[in-house]
């Protein structure tokens, strides 16, 4: 008879370390980043969410910076133009490794509930003939940008008040008829899928994965990206439905495709991908230690699930850029502060690129965080490093909570800037 192996029991700190290790946020990078490291980081996360707000660096650049340190932002666009990555609607609009193209293409049916797919299907239904003419235009004349088409009238409805051609381009992109061939000044350049994926993915339009295979693969990829997760958090990573229960994962545990572990203080089991078995063993013996301090994007995978961030870090994070200003608690584009395995606070920042100033309008520590000398040094270094990468090396620290933090943090920042 086969002897059952007792499941590891982790402390919450050990669980967090495993999560951050999988996400590439456990330790400070040991060397200067190379372009290949960007692709590795995206593959590790599976998905890199896209957002256009650029009060500081746009989110996808910042997510990569948090893991890799300083690197040329142009590398991300180069990977896209080189067909190493592609854009797709998954969690939201995301970059994903081109090696996963067939999985995403065959996942369309399980994403039918996504708002972007529903909108695209509605536009395809109401404007199909016009979209076909647009596709023929691209087929004959080559890739296009939205700006290639003049707006016929001001205003308009639909997606963010876009002109018709932009809505048609986005609909065809969401449904997989068009892809983003490259970006110019972060604006999408659209081309036929057969010319983008078709140039690098064999059988791009004929290879079929059944629904069960797609569901299994996205589930396992989600767990691997998260490092450690409860069942109820898995579906959100690729925006699939329904939420999973522990019973849904029993067959994968029995097959050895997932490892089930316990975390002290949690009333539900957690799951680890076998690829992280070695890291799990280190975590369980306290040898997987978080030492990195950095600023995170509001769209970082670590915080994009509010419930998960609360369970892992005791950190209640709400994105407030879409909240009316009088109702904001913290600010417009607030960056979580990661320090040695904890989310210790958040700051409202703006990069004034022309003046070379990185403005910290307000910095808030979590109520249970003690601002000792080591933490102040970690936060100062995280801010200074990020400011230098933005080419805004002068840090203007304004308000802090608690207010007593402002003087020592300013002193620590001055010491770094004068070094």
Image (cartoon, rainbow, N blue to C red):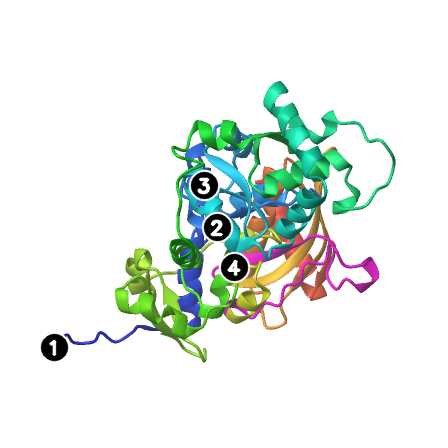
Query: From mark 3 to mark 1, how far is it between C-alphas?
Result: 43 Å
Is 323 situated left or right of 340 in this image? right
Q: Which residue of the protein is positioned furthest toward the left in this rendering?
A: 1
Q: Quadrant of the C terminus?
A: top right
- The residue under the point 81% across, 58% down is 325
Label disc, if present, on residue 101 of the rendered structure: 3
- Earlier-in-chain disc, 4 versus 1: 1
Query: From mark 3 to mark 2, how far is it between C-alphas?
Result: 10 Å
- Earlier-in-chain disc, 4 versus 2: 2
x then y, percent, for residue 4:
20, 76
Label disc, if present, on residue 107 of the rendered structure: 2
Residue behind mark 1: 1
Residues at marks 4 and 2 touching, judged by CB atoms closer than 8 Å: no
- Earlier-in-chain disc, 2 versus 1: 1
Which type of secondary structure does the marked residue at label 1 adopt?
loop
Query: From mark 4 to mark 3, how far is it between C-alphas?
Result: 17 Å
User: Any magenta on residue 76?
Assistant: no
Quarter residue 136 falls in: top right
Which type of secondary structure does the marked residue at label 4 adopt?
loop
- Earlier-in-chain disc, 3 versus 1: 1
x then y, percent, for residue 240:
52, 59
User: Any magenta on residue 319?
Assistant: yes
Q: Mainly helix, strand or loop, the magenta region?
A: loop
Q: Which residue of the protein is positioned furthest toward the top in this rendering?
A: 141
Find the magenta span and give its range. 312-341
158 above or below 258?
A: above
Residue behind mark 4: 240
- Earlier-in-chain disc, 3 versus 2: 3
Which type of secondary structure does the marked residue at label 3 adopt?
helix
């Amino acid at each position: 008879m086969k002897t059952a192996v007792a499941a590891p029991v982790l402390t919450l700190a050990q669980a967090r370390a495993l999560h951050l290790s999988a996400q590439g946020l456990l330790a400070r990078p040991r060397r200067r980043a190379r372009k290949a490291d960007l692709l590795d980081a995206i593959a590790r996360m599976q998905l890199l969410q896209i957002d256009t707000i650029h009060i500081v660096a746009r989110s996808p650049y910042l997510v990569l910076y948090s893991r890799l340190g300083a690197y040329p932002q142009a590398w991300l666009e180069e990977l896209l133009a080189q067909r190493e990555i592609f854009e797709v609607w998954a969690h939201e609009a995301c970059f994903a490794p081109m090696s996963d193209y067939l999985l995403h293409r065959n996942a369309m049916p399980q994403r039918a509930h996504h708002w972007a797919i529903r909108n695209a299907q509605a536009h395809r239904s109401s404007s199909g003939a016009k979209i076909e003419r647009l596709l023929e235009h691209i087929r004959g004349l080559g890739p296009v940008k939205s700006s290639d088409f003049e707006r016929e009238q001001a205003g308009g409805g639909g997606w963010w008040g876009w002109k018709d051609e932009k809505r048609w381009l986005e609909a065809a992109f969401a449904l997989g008829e068009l892809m983003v061939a490259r970006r110019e000044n972060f604006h999408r350049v659209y081309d036929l899928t057969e010319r983008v994926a078709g140039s690098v993915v064999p059988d791009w339009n004929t290879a079929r994965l059944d629904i069960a295979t797609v569901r299994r693969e996205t589930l396992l990829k989600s767990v691997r990206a998260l490092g450690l997760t409860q069942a109820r958090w898995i579906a959100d990573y690729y925006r699939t439905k329904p939420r999973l229960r522990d019973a849904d994962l029993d067959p994968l545990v029995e097959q050895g495709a997932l490892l089930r572990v316990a975390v002290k203080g949690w009333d539900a089991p957690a799951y680890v991908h076998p690829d992280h078995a070695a890291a799990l063993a280190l975590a369980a013996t306290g040898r997987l230690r978080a030492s990195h301090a950095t600023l995170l994007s509001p769209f970082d995978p670590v915080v994009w699930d509010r419930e998960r961030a609360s369970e892992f870090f005791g950190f209640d994070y709400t994105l407030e850029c879409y909240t009316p200003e009088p109702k904001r608690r913290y600010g417009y584009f607030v960056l979580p502060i990661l320090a040695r395995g904890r989310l210790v606070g958040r700051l409202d920042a703006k990069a004034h690129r022309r003046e070379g100033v990185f403005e910290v309008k307000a910095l808030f520590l979590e109520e249970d965080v003690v601002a000792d000398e080591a933490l102040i040094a970690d936060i100062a270094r995280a801010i200074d490093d990020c400011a230098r990468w933005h080419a805004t090396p002068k840090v203007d620290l304004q308000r802090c909570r608690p207010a007593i933090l402002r003087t020592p943090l300013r002193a620590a920042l001055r010491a770094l800037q004068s070094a």
